[in-house]
Image (cartoon, rainbow, N blue to C red):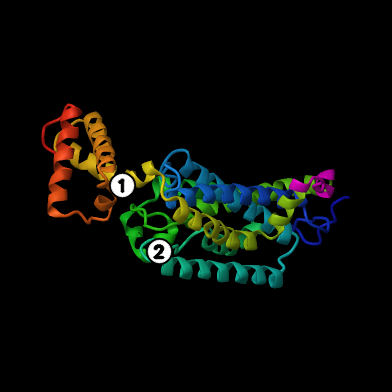
Amino acid sequence: MTALAASEPGVLARPAGRLELIDVARGLALLAMALYHLFWDLSFLKLIETQVATAAPWPWAARAIAGSFLFLVGVSLVLAHGDGLRWHAFLRRLGMILAAAAAVTLVTFLVFPESYIFFGILHCIALSSLLALPFLRAPLPLVALSAAIVLSAPLWATSPAFDAPLLAFLGLGTRLPVTNDYVPLFPWFGMVLAGLATARVTLPWLAASAVWRWQASSRAGRALAWAGRHSLSVYLIHQPILLAVLYPLSVAVGPHPAAEAAPFIRSCEAQCVAAGHTGDRCHRACHCTVEELRRRDLWARTLQNALGPDERLQVEALARQCFARAGGALRAP
C-alpha cells in the first residue's frame, strides 16, 4: 500500500486504516502501567515490604511508562490529523479525556483529600493535545527545538514564582506538590512533541512499507492491540479492578510484617540519630524493639497508640534493653 498524495503543502498523507503496530505499543504501555499499579497497590496496602513510591527503580519505571504514553500521544496526533485536522473527532476525543480527568480528580479528592490528583497523566494528555495542534504543520526543526526546550526546562527554568498552587501544573516550581499522580506540562509536553516529530519524519516511510499492513497474529498480540484501541477505558477501569481484588485480600491476610513496621522503624531511627547515635546502632536497636514488642504481645497496642501507663513503662524498658544490646546508650531516643 502506498501513500496518498498530499493535497496541501506541509500536509502529511497517509493510507487509510489504523496502524496496528501503534495499538500494540499502546497496549504494551498499558500492560506496564497495570503491572506498576499492581505493585503500587500491594505496597500501599502493605502486602509487600517494598515501598514502591520511593524505592528504586520504581519511580524511574513510572516515569518511563508516563513518557511512553505521552510519546504515543504525539504519534497518534500525526496519524489521526497529520493529513488535515478532523475537528469533530479531535474534540470528541478531547471531551472524553477531559471528562475522565475530571472524574479522576473528583474521586481522588473524595478518597485522598490530602493527595488528590489535580494534574495527572490524563490532564497532561488533554492540555498537551491542544498545545500540540500548531506543531502538526510547524517546520520540523522548530518542533525538535521546542521539544528540547520543554524537556530540559525543569533543569534551568524552575523558580519559587511557580510554586503557587494555580501554577503547579507547569512543573517549574521548587517544591513537589503532594499528589498521587503528577505529570506536569514541563517536561512531559516535550515527550508529546518528540512523538509528533518522530511520526512526521517516519510517516512517509511507514505509509509505503509493509509495516502499515502488519497485524498481530498471536492471541497476546491481538489482546494488546484491542487494549491499545480502548486505552482510555482500560486506564479507567484497571485500578478499581485491582483494588477490588487486593483490598479484601489485605483484610484477609493482614499486612506484611516488615511493611507494617516500616513507619515505626523510620520514626524510631530518625529520633535515635537525632539523639546522637550512629545509624547502624539505631537500625539494630529499632528492629530489636519491634521484635520484642511482638514477642510480648505489645505490638498491636503500640501501633494503635492504646498503651496503658504500665505498658508504656514496659515498652520504654524494652527499648533501653535493645539500645544496650546494640551498643548504644542505655536510654531510648
The image position of residue 46, as x and y in percent, is: 42, 49
> Magenta segment range?
209-220
The image position of residue 49, as x and y in percent, is: 42, 42
- Residue at image mark 1: 263
The image position of residue 292, as x and y in percent, is: 25, 38
Q: In this view, does 158 lie to the left or right of 66?
A: left
Give the quadrant of the C terminus: top left
The foreground one among 133 and 293 is 293
Asked if disc 2 and disc 1 are in contact, CB closer than 8 Å, the reply is no
C-alpha span from label 2 to label 1 = 19 Å
Q: Does the magenta-highlighted stretch encompass residue 62?
A: no
Residue lying at 59% horizontally and 47% vertically, measured from the top left: 32
Q: Which amino acid does label 2 sit on?
A: Phe
Q: Is mark 1 on a helix, strand or loop?
A: helix
- Residue at image mark 2: 112
Q: In which quarter of the image is residue 76?
A: bottom right
**Which residue is farthest front?**
296
Q: Does the magenta-highlighted stretch encompass residue 217?
A: yes
